[in-house]
Amino acid sequence: MIVEGNKNSIRSCFIIGEGSLTLNCAEWILLQGCQIHGIVSSSKTIKKWANENDIPYFDSKNKQLYETAILNDNFDYLFSIVNPAILKEPLLSKPHIFSINFHDSFLPRYAGMHSTSWAIINGEQEHGITWHIMLEKVHAGDILKQAKVTLEPDDTAISLNQKCYETAFSTFKELLSELLTDTYIRQPQQVDPNTYCGLYSKPRGNGWIRWDQTAEKIEALYRAAQLGKHNNFFSTCKFVYKGAAYIVEELTSISCNEINSPGTVVLCDKKELQVATK
């Protein structure tokens, strides 16, 4: 455990990120009297907010433009918040102090992508969030702040993401206060390669339902693949019936007194399809 101190207080930063969490953190940074030298995003909402607050805005699609702006500026911290791009040197070492990233898991578990989906598939009862120092090795830097999140039986990836964002914002307010008062703590982490989630990692069968699994397993797969309006690079819950493939839009697990072999169609009408599972 390393306690930092005797450094100049944070007064300026650059932000790269998307969505409501990025916007909430940016607003909080301004409220604490800090300067934002620029914000990189693809969000129209964030662009509008940046223009209203006289903050330079850079489209995340124009990598050369925003990287040049960052490398030619002088600032204390680089915040990466819900940022799908992997940042590398010399960007990471450009801030006077260091770069900080938000990750939606309790590191070192579930480093990588789609952390909330994997936690649901694996039947976890608890998840979490982490703010950590960025290194070129993804999600491997010292931990600055963590908090746990309860995973309910009916949580989907989108609802668990929302819980993580809410927890991340409250934790960020604590972290920023510690940064400003030089009271933050750096906690080295032991990287766990067994739970790393690659961008192209897929659930077993890539979302195709196996009726010889339990209803709980199938329902977990469905909930893990529910990402709302976000681009879904994870998987889609689907099945084959009478030679045709279908995507599952709604799935509910029900109990039945009858004993049927897995895959037996119990009911099929215009409203629903009931299939027996293990």
Image: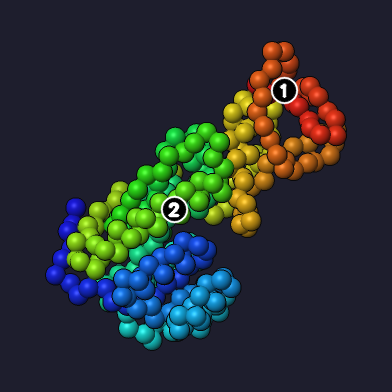
- x, y percentage for residue 54? 45, 84
- Vertically, is 97 above or below 138? below
- x, y percentage for residue 119? 49, 41
Answer with left or right where residue 57 lies relative to residue 235: left
Kind of element beneath mark 1? loop
Kind of element beneath mark 2? helix
Residue at 30% from the left image edge and 54% from the top image edge: 145
- Vertically, is 263 above or below 18? above
Residue at 37% from the left image edge and 44% from the top image edge: 148
Q: Depth-wise, is mark 2 or mark 1 nearer the camera?
A: 2
Query: Amino acid type of disc 2?
Result: Glu
Residue at 85% from the left image edge and 34% from the top image edge: 270
- Specify the quadrant of the image occupied by residue 194: top left
| Res. 276 mark | 1
| Camera-nearest residue between 261 and 250 | 250
| Residue farthest along the left direction in this orientation | 6
Q: Are marks 2 and 1 in contact (CB under 8 Å)?
A: no
Q: Earlier in the sequence, mark 2 or mark 1?
A: 2
Query: Amino acid type of disc 1?
Result: Ala
Q: How crowded is the residue under tag 2: few (<14 C-alpha within 10 Å), some, or many (20+)?
A: some
- x, y percentage for residue 143? 30, 55
- x, y percentage for residue 197? 49, 49
| Residue farthest along the top direction in this orientation | 258
C-alpha separation, residue under disc 2 versus residue under disc 1 = 38 Å
Q: Which residue is mark 2?
A: 166
| Camera-nearest residue between 80 and 158 | 158
| Camera-nearest residue between 68 and 100 | 100
Q: Quadrant of the C terminus?
A: top right
